[in-house]
Amino acid sequence: MDTTALRSAYDRLLDAAATPDLGDAADGGWNADQILAHLLSVDASIAAVALGVVAGSRPTFDNRISLDTWNLDRVIAEHSGRADLMEHVRSQATVLCDIADQLSEEAASVLVPSLLLSNDALVLDKPVPLAGLIDGLSEDHVPAHTRQLLALRVAGSSAGAAERTDASHHRNISFRRT
């Protein structure tokens, strides 16, 4: 797989996360640290799925743990601050991309039973090719969270407030179903 787009998406996300004036979401959505913790959880899960496929097992992908506030708080507590969270996101994104870069076409096409929730609603409950899970990160998931981070800017405009509402809790996030 080619992960050029995914690597670029993470660069943009981490640039947005480095913005010093990020506040809390006005609509009760996630703050910057929760977004980063969520990404760490999702990326680890998808990397584990990819490694499982390569190992010959038939793993599943279920994003519920990456939405759980207790789990997000636990991930945040394991880091010494936003800079540490950001570095872990960068490192883990690199690991995920390195794994994806080495996937054969056969492995990338393995169907992975997937369960995705967003904003407490079922988004997907069916098998998705492994490549679809990974490509969905670059095509939708990471850019949506980048917009969500940018919408947290304290000095944001009214357009930022509208983006905050649209991006919170994964309303716009899906995975490619090729």
Image (cartoon, rainbow, N blue to C red):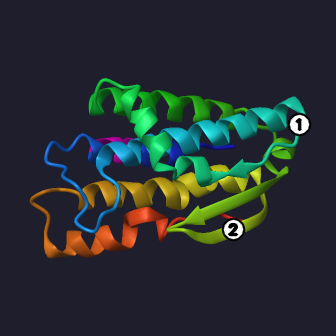
Give the alpha-carbon distance from disc 2 to disc 1, as whole Å: 22 Å
Q: Give x and y (percent) for residue 148.
A: 33, 59
Tell me if 162 is positioned left or right of 88 in this view: left
Q: Give x and y (percent) for residue 49.
A: 73, 40
Tell me if 107 is positioned left or right of 49 in this view: right
Q: Are marks 2 and 1 in contact (CB under 8 Å)?
A: no
Tell me if 158 is positioned left or right of 28 in this view: left
Tell me if 31 is positioned left or right of 121 in this view: left
Residue behind mark 1: 57
Asked which quadrant contains residue 2, the reply is top right
Q: Is residue 136 above or below residue 50?
A: below
Residue sitting at 37 percent across and 73 percent down? 166
Residue sitting at 74 percent across and 66 percent down? 125
User: Toward the viewer: 6 or 111?
Assistant: 111
The dot on residue 124 is: 2
* Quadrant housing the C terminus: bottom right
Q: What range is drawn magenta here?
A: 11-15
Q: Give x and y (percent) for residue 104.
A: 81, 39
First in sequence: mark 2 vs mark 1? 1
Asked which quadrant contains residue 59, the reply is top right
Q: Identify which amino acid the numbered label 1 is placed on.
A: Ser
Secondary structure under tag 1 reads loop
| Neighbours of disc 2 within 10 Å: few (<14), some (14-19), many (20+) | some
Is residue 157 highlighted in magenta? no
Secondary structure under tag 2 reads strand
Is residue 13 highlighted in magenta? yes
Q: Is residue 175 visible?
A: no
